[in-house]
Amino acid sequence: MDDSEVATKTETAYRTLRQEILETRLQPGAPLKLGALRDAYGIGWTPLREALSRLEAEHLVISSANKGYTVAPVSMAELSDLTNARRLVELPMLAESIANGDEEWETQLVAAHFRLSRCKPPVENPEELVISDWEERHEAFHHALLAASKSQWLMRFYVQIKDQLRRHHRILAITPGLAASKGPEWRDSAAFHSLRDALAIEPHTELMNAALDHDVDKAVALLGAHIELTKQVFSVADFSKPH
């Protein structure tokens, strides 16, 4: 096997495992046994080890001398830290994006909002396809908001933070105590109402309109409130213990 073939297999292994972790099919805290991963995904030893090393560098995987590799855990403390980091990165990016935004940027933002508006939030139907579809459209909307920002480094930080937050959001959507019941008790709970408010299209519409009006102060305030609401969803859910 030549070097290019090894590199291709490593990239495939990396992308496969990364997607499985981000979409929490490999659960936070789960052990990553090399033999089991090789059998489950058809990945060779060398590409597997190199892929896990890359994922460890991204803090999606952790390793220890005694336990080997495990999926990085999620926790309320981690979510709070990520939320603060998101504010520090995303709010200045939004202000810069609005300042630089032209007609093409406005057009793309409106299109992304329309696609999001045509997708039902997964608050009452946390099935895999529903969650994935909504995530893709929601991320596209937020990316469209920031697309006119010129800072490549801030965009890199934004993407890294977004991926880590995605795992936390996924855990909330699929936690059995929240998602599995879907009955009167779940719909009457504070967690349900907070989650519904966080995923609703109306705050996104208000945010889009402020951006299109080039009202930087209002848009930044709305985005800041939207970011905090996501953290509040976890605070009212049973998320006090690491997952």
Image (cartoon, helix red, strand yellow):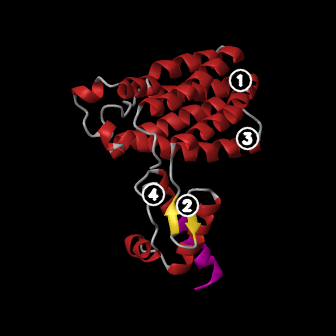
Mark 1 sits on what residue? 98
Taking the spot 57% from the left edge, 68% from the top edge, the residue there is 64
Question: Residue 154, which numbered label?
Answer: 3
For badge 3, the amino acid type reads Leu
Percent across and percent down for residue 145 are 62, 29
Tags 3 and 1 touching, CB below 8 Å: no
Mark 2 sits on what residue? 61
Percent across and percent down for residue 129 are 35, 44
Percent across and percent down for residue 176 are 31, 43
Q: Nearer the viewer, residue 206 or 23?
A: 23
Q: Which quadrant would the N terminus be assigned to in this image? A: bottom right
Dominant SS type (magenta): helix
Q: Is residue 27 above or below residue 85?
A: below
Which numbered disc flags the more N-terminal residue, 3 or 4? 4
Q: Which residues are magenta?
A: 1-14
Q: Nearer the viewer, residue 70 or 137?
A: 70
Residue 90 located left or right of residue 96 = left
Disc 2 or disc 3, which is closer to the eye?
2
Residue 151 located left or right of residue 68 = right
For badge 4, the amino acid type reads Glu
For badge 2, the amino acid type reads Val
